[in-house]
């Protein structure tokens, strides 16, 4: 189980490098689910929810929202 954070951290670092270098297809709008116990991974699509403070584009703490 101790290896799981390393695996997920490496995947996150790879995504950051992909975004910075504009290489490949980033997971923007998608979520990768990794199941280390069964050695499986899958990707699901995500959509922004209007009105959501996290993904909906409304950020109450930002100066532009006040
Ligand atoms: Zn949201």
Image: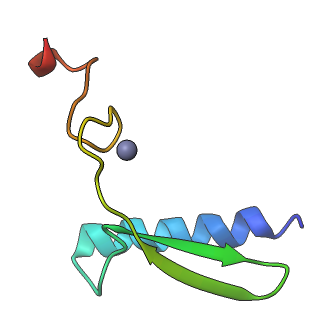
Q: Residue at x 39, y 65 (%)?
A: 16
Task: Tell me if 38 is positioned left or right of 7 in this view.
Answer: right
Q: Nearer the viewer, residue 39 or 4?
A: 39
Ligand 1 located in image quadrant: top left
Rendered image quadrant of residue 41: bottom right
Percent across and percent down for residue 1 are 89, 67
Look at the picture and state if 39 lies above or below 26.
below
Which quadrant holds the C terminus?
top left
Task: Tell me if 31 is positioned left or right of 10 in this view.
Answer: left
Q: Residue furthest front?
A: 50
Percent across and percent down for residue 65 are 14, 19
Task: Tell me if 45 is positioned left or right of 57 in this view.
Answer: right
Q: Residue at x 31, y 61 (%)?
A: 47
Look at the picture and state if 45 lies above or below 54.
below
Q: Nearer the viewer, residue 13 or 45?
A: 45
Q: Residue at x 49, y 66 (%)?
A: 13
């Amino acid at each position: 189980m101790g290896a799981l954070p390393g695996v997920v951290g490496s995947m996150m670092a790879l995504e950051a490098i992909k975004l910075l270098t504009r290489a490949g297809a980033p997971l923007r709008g998608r979520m990768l689910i990794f199941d280390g116990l069964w050695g499986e991974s899958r990707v699901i699509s995500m959509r922004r929810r209007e009105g959501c403070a996290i993904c909906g584009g409304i950020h109450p703490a930002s100066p532009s929202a006040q």
